[in-house]
């Protein structure tokens, strides 16, 4: 075991940072940290693991004994942070979160990196659950809450670690994508689109960082790539490792033939030319493809399709991915982690298939660094037009973006009205009452945000429960 004993996490409230803190504690380190705003489920995870942390940042925290042997710096932390400045002044050893994973968690283990613009959290969760369900005690790090696990991370005992591979930058001092630190043995390229407009100039820049990931897969490793995605098709040609493909393409090794929605989803596919069937609790064609990608990634460990079926029979899904928050004879309320128009379209198409005769009301909070910009102004309107009613919240931290680059909410509303979608803007006050007053019996209501809507979802559910 490393000789370092005391690790301090600056920005411990992030999902991945809290997960790393939990694993550091599992490895025997003394763990502490700080953050400005820590809220559930992260705060619950830290409390359950008895990890102490400071609310707010203060240089005095680093003056307390024991002096940290290592500082792990979250990628949301920037210069001017009191604790970062103190650590720099005292020349304390500082590493990024991905480097901590590489040095202390992954090390020489097989590293299964699940990457792509969409579907990372669900697919990582399914891979980790499928392996563990079938007796492989893999370690894992998931950027969300999989309902099968008590927390989003675990060291595990197997010579294998499954990690959600984020293409976002690493830290203030390392602008490479996080997944480049994860020493991949196997990589899943689920799909590639333009995203993270705050750090990537265009699709070519996004493709380049994924190309760098493909370059470092060892020759005895594996690349699983989406045969339907043009960017994935381009990048997989340069892989030194074996390549397995999935998709609807005739050439795909795991080829989706048909997908049917009912109480559960029925996935009919070819596995290396042999027809197979899986029944899944996950809805949507995108999740059928996620399932085939997961199956391809672990085909060495789970060579029989029945092994994946057994895992799907017990898979409880991922929180905030079309998660039902409330349901009775009057209405159904769901929450979805919306960060990109493509994902919004896929999930609204899924809801249309699940509830074909019911009115669909969507509430959208433009919050991600891509969604708050006008790059996908047209695509967002086309996706939201699948709803009968769209209620639009204000842009999160709109002052950060100039008029020329910010999403135009008035244009969005006008485009939606032109496509016969009823629109409204969410007010600053009495928000839950505003929503409930506009609902009709038997409505399906979906809150779409990668944030929290300022507590609006829980407030709306509480009001509906009293009706």
Image (cartoon, rainbow, N blue to C red):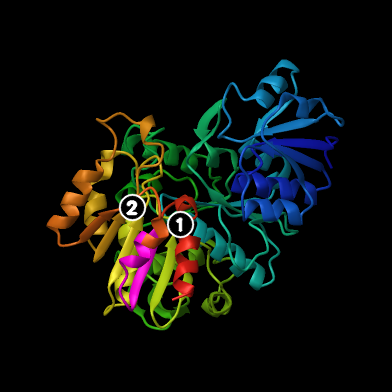
Instruction: Tell how many labels.
Output: 2
C-alpha gap between disc 1 and disc 2: 11 Å
- Figure check: 78 above or below 207: above
Asked whether 7 or 260 is in front, the reply is: 7
Q: Report x, y in % for residue 307.
A: 58, 77
- Figure check: 70 above or below 445: above
Snapshot quadrant of residue 419: bottom left
Magenta stretch holds residue 438: yes
* Disc 2 element: loop
- Figure check: 433 above or below 394: below
Snapshot quadrant of residue 96: top right
Q: Are marks 1 and 2 in contact (CB under 8 Å)?
A: yes
Seen in the image, is 203 located left or right of residue 106? left
* Disc 1 element: helix
- The crowding category of the residue bearing disc 2, from other C-alpha atoms within 10 Å (few below 14, some 14 to 19, many at least 20), is some
Res 317 seen here: yes
Magenta stretch holds residue 104: no
Image quadrant holding the C terminus, namely: bottom left
Q: Which residues are magenta?
A: 434-447
Q: Which residue is mark 1?
A: 456
Residue in view at x 81 percent, y 25 percent: 63
Q: Which residue is mark 2?
A: 426
Residue in view at x 23 percent, y 57 percent: 423
Seen in the image, is 85 located left or right of residue 392? right
């Amino acid at each position: 075991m490393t000789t370092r004993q005391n690790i301090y996490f600056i920005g411990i409230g992030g999902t991945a940072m809290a997960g790393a803190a939990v694993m550091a504690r599992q490895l025997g380190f003394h763990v502490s940290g700080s953050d400005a705003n820590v809220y559930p489920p992260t705060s619950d995870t830290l409390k359950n693991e008895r990890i102490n942390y400071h609310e707010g940042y203060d240089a005095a925290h680093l003056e307390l004994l024991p002096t940290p042997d290592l500082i792990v710096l979250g990628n949301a932390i920037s210069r001017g942070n009191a604790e970062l400045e103190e650590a720099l002044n005292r020349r304390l050893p500082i590493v990024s979160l991905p480097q901590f994973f590489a040095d202390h968690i992954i090390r020489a283990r097989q590293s299964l990196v699940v990457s792509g613009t969409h579907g990372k959290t669900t697919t990582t969760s399914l891979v980790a659950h499928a392996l563990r369900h079938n007796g492989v005690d893999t370690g894992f790090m998931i950027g969300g809450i999989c309902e099968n696990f008590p927390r989003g991370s675990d060291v595990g005992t197997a010579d294998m670690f499954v990690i959600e591979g984020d293409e976002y930058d690493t830290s203030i001092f390392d602008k490479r994508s996080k997944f480049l630190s994860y020493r991949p043995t196997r990589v899943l390229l689920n799909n590639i689109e333009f995203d993270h407009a705050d750090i990537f100039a265009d699709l070519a820049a996004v493709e380049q960082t994924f190309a760098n990931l493909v370059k470092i897969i060892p020759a005895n490793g594996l690349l699983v790539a989406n045969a339907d995605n043009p960017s994935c098709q381009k990048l997989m040609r340069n892989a030194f490792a074996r390549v397995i493909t999935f998709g609807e393409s005739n050439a795909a090794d795991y080829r989706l033939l048909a997908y049917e929605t009912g109480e559960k989803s029925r996935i009919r596919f070819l596995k290396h030319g042999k027809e197979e069937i899986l029944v899944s609790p996950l809805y949507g064609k995108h999740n059928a493809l996620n399932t085939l990608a997961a199956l391809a990634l672990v085909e060495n460990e789970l060579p029989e399709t029945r092994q994946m079926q057994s895992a799907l029979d017990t898979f409880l899904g991922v929180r905030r991915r079309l998660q039902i928050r409330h349901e009775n004879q009057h209405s159904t309320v769901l929450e979805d982690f919306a960060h990109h128009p493509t994902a919004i379209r896929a999930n609204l198409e899924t809801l249309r298939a699940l509830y074909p005769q019911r009115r669909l009301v969507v509430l959208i909070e433009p919050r991600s660094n891509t969604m708050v910009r006008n790059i996908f102004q047209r695509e967002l309107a086309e996706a939201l037009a699948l709803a009968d009613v769209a209620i639009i919240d204000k842009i999160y931290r709109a002052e950060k973006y100039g008029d020329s680059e910010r999403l135009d909410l008035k244009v969005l509303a006008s485009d939606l009205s032109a496509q016969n979608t009823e629109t409204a803007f969410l007010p600053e006050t009495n928000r839950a009452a505003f929503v409930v007053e506009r609902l009709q019996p038997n409505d399906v209501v979906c809150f779409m945000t990668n944030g929290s809507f300022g507590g609006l979802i829980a407030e709306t559910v509480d009001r509906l429960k009293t009706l």
